Image: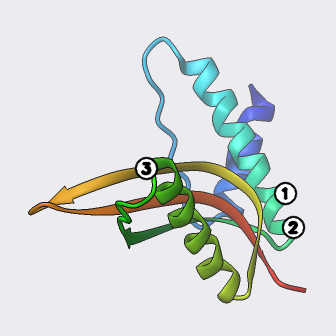
């Protein structure tokens, strides 16, 4: 228990923001998960990396499938990240959806990634 508390204190001291949500019945599991997240955050900062979220919206091309539209949106999103002098070293999560408003369709995609500056 002392090790876990030490890891949490170090994580709070070295990171700008940390959220710890403990659910009833999952105290030990949530604490272990928080410790792992804190450790990964510290390791990333030592390597000059950080976790960031990006999102992008593009128009829907009805001539191609939903999967192709979504893939195109993600490619454009990664291009935007690349132009910003960042390199994606890991994709943590990604999501996409087709939005319909007043008969017009758009694709919205988002990614949670680990980035580092280009060398």
Kindly identify which residue carries mark 1.
43
Percent coordinates x, y for residue 7 in the rendering? 76, 43
Which percent across, then down, holds residue 41? 73, 56
Give residue 46's mark. 2
Dot label at residue 66? 3
Total number of numbered discs in the rendering? 3
Count neighbours of disc 1 (C-alpha within 10 A) and say few if under 14, some if 14 to 19, many if 20 or more: few
Q: Position of residue 92 (x, y in %)?
A: 66, 49
- The nearer-to-camera label among 2 and 3 is 3
- Position in image of residue 84 (x %, y %): 65, 88
Mark 3 is surrounded, within 10 Å at the Cα level, by few (under 14), some (14 to 19) or many (20 or more) other residues, namely some
* Residue 115 vertical position relative to residue 43 in the rendered view, above or below: below
Counting residues from the N terminus, which is met first, the one under dot 1 or under dot 3? 1
Left or right of 69 in this view: 86: right
Q: At numbered mark 1, what does the secondary structure look like: helix, strand or loop?
A: helix
In which image quadrant can residue 79 be found?
Answer: bottom right
Between marks 2 and 3, how big is the CA–CA gap? Answer: 39 Å
As drawn, 5 above or below 80: above
- For the N terminus, the quadrant is top right
Q: Residue at x 76, y 42 (%)?
A: 6
> What residue occupies the far left of the structure in this picture?
102
In front of the other: label 1 or label 3?
Answer: 3
The mark that comes first in sequence, 2 or 3, is 2
């Amino acid at each position: 228990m002392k090790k876990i508390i030490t890891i949490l204190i170090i994580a709070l001291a070295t990171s700008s923001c940390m959220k710890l949500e403990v659910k009833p019945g999952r105290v030990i599991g949530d604490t272990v998960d928080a410790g792992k997240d804190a450790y990964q955050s510290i390791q990333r900062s030592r390597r000059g990396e950080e976790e960031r979220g990006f999102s992008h919206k593009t128009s829907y091309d009805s001539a191609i499938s939903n999967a192709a539209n979504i893939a195109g949106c993600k490619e454009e999103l990664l291009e935007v990240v690349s132009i910003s002098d960042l390199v994606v070293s890991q994709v943590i999560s990604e999501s996409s959806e087709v939005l319909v408003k007043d008969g017009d369709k758009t694709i919205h995609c988002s990614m949670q990634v680990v980035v580092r500056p280009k060398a």
